[in-house]
């Protein structure tokens, strides 16, 4: 029980995919101009993460090692298609706001990274909890980032006026420079908290900062050696 709880909380804090592993930065910077966009993208990614992790875990002993990446992408793409159709049908305004970044969840490095580093090596229940924790951690960060940018850039929060009647909005926070600035502040805050807790701060981007990178690199080496033997 404690092990499963640790797996779930890793994605929320210790190994947060956005602030600690610095993955999925493209949608993080692109769609966080409003808090509702962050919630929509985060929940869509979470659903795909949980479902794809479960299926990949269930098939981990069936999928040949040589074609595991194409197989993972095919599984992920199937769930992304379902999510995209649901969003188009029930929340067309959110679909318009997320645009191309919704179907691009297929190649989101958070989802593919968890499939390779965790789901393909662990049973279904831990894989479900890993996907849920990582997805909620991603959702929380991009929602907070969207709320900050919306409040400072438009004076609203979830489209309700907050400061727009008293203070002129700073439009730059709705533009790419504002996104980079807010993201940098959040990463810096995460590093400061990590240092106080005696943990290693983020120094490199992507897989280089992932605690599970050795597992991925070892798998890649095994695949290369198998190909050379043939």
Image (spheres, rainbow, N blue to C red):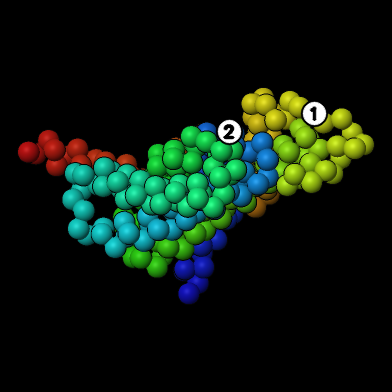
Residue farthest bottom in this picture: 1
Above or below 132: residue 27: above
Badge 1 crowding class, 10 Å Cα cut-off, few under 14, some 14 to 19, many 20 or more, is some
Q: Which residue is mark 1?
A: 170
Q: Quadrant of the C terminus?
A: top left
User: Which structural element holds mark 2?
Assistant: helix
Above or below 196: residue 220: above
Q: Which residue is mark 2?
A: 30
Q: Residue at x 55, y 61 (%)?
A: 9
User: Is 218 positioned to the left or the right of 35 in the image?
Assistant: left
Residue 3 is situated, as x and y percent measured from the top left of the image, at 46, 69
Image marks 2 and 1: residues in contact by CB distance under 8 Å: no
Q: For the residues marked 2 and 1, what is the alpha-carbon distance in whole angstroms?
A: 18 Å
Residue 6 seen in render: yes
User: Is 148 positioned to the left or the right of 83 in the image?
Assistant: right
Q: Residue at x 21, y 53 (%)?
A: 63
Q: Residue at x 9, y 39 (%)?
A: 229
Residue 87 is situated, as x and y percent measured from the top left of the image, at 51, 49
Residue farthest left in this picture: 230
Badge 2 crowding class, 10 Å Cα cut-off, few under 14, some 14 to 19, many 20 or more, is some
Residue 80 is situated, as x and y percent measured from the top left of the image, at 41, 48
46 or 225: nearer the eye? 46
31 or 197: nearer the eye? 31
Quadrant of residue 125 within the rendered picture = bottom left
User: Is 125 positioned to the left or the right of 151 in the image?
Assistant: left
Above or below 154: residue 43: below
Residue 178 is situated, as x and y percent measured from the top left of the image, at 69, 28
Q: Earlier in the sequence, mark 2 or mark 1?
A: 2
């Amino acid at each position: 029980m404690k092990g499963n709880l640790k797996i779930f909380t890793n994605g929320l804090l210790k190994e947060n995919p956005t602030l600690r592993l610095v993955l999925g930065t493209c949608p993080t910077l692109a769609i966080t101009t409003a808090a509702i966009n962050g919630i929509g993208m985060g929940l869509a990614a979470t659903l795909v993460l949980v479902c794809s992790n479960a299926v990949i875990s269930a098939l981990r002993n069936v999928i040949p090692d040589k074609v595991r990446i194409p197989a993972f992408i095919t599984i992920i793409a199937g769930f992304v298609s379902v999510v995209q159709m649901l969003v188009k049908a029930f929340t067309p305004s959110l679909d318009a706001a997320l645009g191309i970044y919704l179907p691009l969840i297929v190649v989101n490095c958070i989802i593919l990274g968890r499939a390779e580093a965790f789901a393909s090596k662990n049973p279904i229940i831990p894989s479900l909890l890993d996907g849920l924790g990582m997805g909620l951690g991603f959702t929380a960060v991009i929602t907070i980032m969207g709320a900050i940018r919306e409040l400072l850039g438009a004076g609203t929060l979830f489209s309700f006026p907050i400061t727009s009647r008293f203070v002129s909005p700073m439009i730059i926070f709705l533009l790419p420079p504002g996104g980079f600035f807010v993201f940098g502040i959040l990463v810096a805050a995460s590093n400061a908290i990590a240092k106080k807790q005696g943990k290693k701060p983020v120094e490199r981007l992507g897989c280089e900062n992932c605690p599970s990178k050795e597992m991925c690199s070892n798998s890649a080496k095994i695949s290369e050696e198998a190909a050379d033997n043939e």
